Image: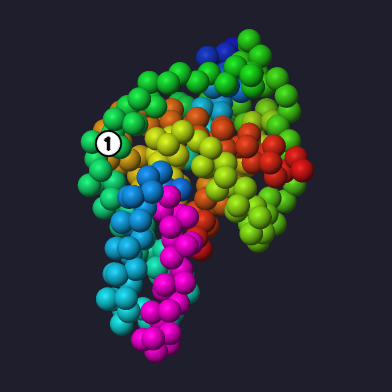
Amino acid sequence: MMGWLRITCRQAQVLLSQRQDGGLGPLQVLRLRLHLTACDWCSRVARQFRFISEAVRRIGS
Amino acid sequence: MDAGSLQQAVAELRPTLLRIARLQLRNDAWAEDAVSETLISALEGADRFGGQSQLKTWVVGILKHKIIDQFRRSGREVSLEAAAEAAQVETFDELYKQDGHRINEPLEWGDPEQALSRVQFFEILQMCVDELPAALARVFMMREWLELETQQICKENDITSTNCFVMLHRARVRLRECLEMRWFAQ
């Protein structure tokens, strides 16, 4: 049940990046959230992607 | 700040501005042009610098506009490079098992915010951006440093939104790997 909502880490990391660029639809948001709830490794990568954005924005400041 | 001191302070920013412009534009001549125009604009508009922000922040703000202008002037060359880069297929198979799950646990970066106060961290970050293919770095920096919307990035580079998302993802994965190896694993 709900298997159609399941995604792999490879898919999740594409969606993580896409989320930062405002490119996710509601279903993709739901799939990603469910994956992140269960996957510590991808949650870690999510934090690291956000940190990279923050760091790049500070270049030159 | 009097006019003479301001002129000197702006001129002293040149090496920093040039490094940033090269990182973003990936073309020395374009970077030189963008920085020269920035310095001229800063000096001409010195009366608009109210001193509320740091001089460097104000001048870097001008540089951002000049870089966008430079992209527009170099439109065809930029879009050809972007199209070639978008055609590259990168699967990151080294990171994932066949079932799509990660092979190795990503390193815990601890409190990465601490790195933001270290000059050396930014040197490593710039080195990692520099190692990206030119078009990939350009698209990534347009998104993250110039803070442009993806729609505008697609238009400037003449690429589809799908290609744009894929390129941004590839840049992030590569940067993550690079920072992990060169900074956080040290």
Amino acid type, residue under disc 1 in the picture? Glu
Position of residue B76 relative to residue B89, above or below, is below
Where residue B86 appears, as percent x and y from the top left, is 38, 25
Position of residue A4 relative to residue B183, above or below, is above
From the image, give the main secondary structure of the stretch colored magenta.
helix
**Residue name at image x 34 percent, y 31 percent:** B82
Position of residue A46 relative to residue A58, above or below, is above
Q: Quadrant of the N terminus of chain B?
A: bottom left
Q: Is residue B30 magenta?
A: no
In this view, which residue lies farthest toward the top?
A: B98
Say which of B40 and A46 sits in front: B40
Give SS at disc 1: helix
Q: Is residue B40 left or right of residue B141?
A: left
**Residue name at image x 24 percent, y 46 percent:** B72
**Residue name at image x 50 percent, y 30 percent:** B170
Say which of B7 and B53 sits in front: B7
Where residue B119 appears, as percent x and y from the top left, is 64, 59
Q: Is residue B22 left or right of residue B128?
A: left
**Residue name at image x 32 percent, y 76 percent:** B43
The quarter holding residue B52 reads bottom left
Residue B65 appears anywhere in the view: no
The quarter holding residue B83 reads top left
Please state the chain letter of the residue tagged with numbered disc 1 in the rendered image: B
Give the image's coloring scheme. rainbow
Where residue A45 appears, as percent x and y from the top left, is 63, 35
Residue carrying label 1: B77
Q: Quadrant of the C terminus of chain B?
A: top right
Where residue B104 appears, as percent x and y from the top left, is 73, 24
In this view, which residue lies farthest toward the front?
A: B29
Residue B149 appears anywhere in the view: yes
Which region shows up in magenta? Answer: B1-22
